[in-house]
Image: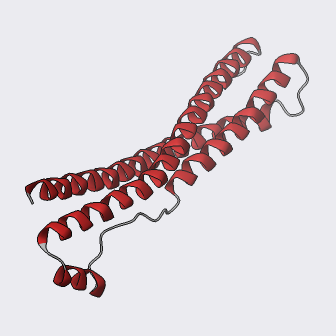
Amino acid sequence: MKKYEELYNLSKEVFAEEITRFERIDSKAAKYFTVLLAMMGLIGVLLKWLSDTILPPSSGLEWLLLIVAIVLFVSIAISWFLAFSVLRIHELKKQSINSKTIQFFRNNNLVNIYYGLARLNAEGVKDNRKATNRKSRKLYQAYWMISITMLLLVLLGFLFIFYACTNNSPP
């Protein structure tokens, strides 16, 4: 009897931890999304300056600025899509109490109840872990895409400063 109670308690803890893991991934994705929005604002300012200053491009440096800006724009769009896809609603299995559950409790002894609930939790953990792992992979992809976007933004910033210094024009 005691071992089934321990099994049930363990399954309940693992089940709760998987739901917490899912929520932590959502929280990180929301933070990434906030960073992306700030980057979008900065990129918008840089793109406005580029469109006002170097279009149409007439030198190699202007072409380089334009190409990096276009790649940066594509990169931020992909990053945004990946971060947003993590935030998409996913269904997690949760324990419910309904008439079938109540009937199960009435018709079974305590050992069978502990074992049955542990089995339900194990199935729920398995299904929830699949959903959480999918979210985790997308979050990882979003992280790397945001990192690449950040590097492109820094590169564009350096090119922007170099262009402003070589052309004696204020940014």
In this orientation, which residue lies closer to the viewer: 38 or 89? 89
Residue 68, quarter of the rendered image: top right
111 lies left or right of 27: left
Residue 116, quarter of the rendered image: bottom left
In the rendered image, the residue lying farthest to the left is 2
Please say if 106 is above or below 55.
Answer: below
**Visual colour scheme:** secondary structure
19 lies left or right of 7: right
* Residue for point 66% across, 18% down: 161
Image coords of residue 21 (percent x, y): 35, 48
In the rendered image, the residue lying farthest to the top is 166
Image coords of residue 25 (percent x, y): 41, 47
Dividing the image into 4 quarters, which one contains the C terminus? top right
Please say if 20 is above or below 114.
Answer: above
Please say if 91 is above or below 125.
Answer: below
Dividing the image into 4 quarters, which one contains the N terminus? bottom left
Image coords of residue 160 (percent x, y): 69, 22
* Residue for point 60% across, 43% down: 40
In this orientation, which residue lies closer to the viewer: 123 or 156? 123
* Residue for point 67% across, 34% down: 46
Residue 125, quarter of the rendered image: bottom left
* Residue for point 80% across, 30% down: 66
In this orientation, which residue lies closer to the viewer: 11 or 33? 11
Image coords of residue 33 (percent x, y): 50, 47
- Number of marks in picture: 0
65 lies left or right of 31: right
In this orientation, which residue lies closer to the viewer: 10 or 64? 10
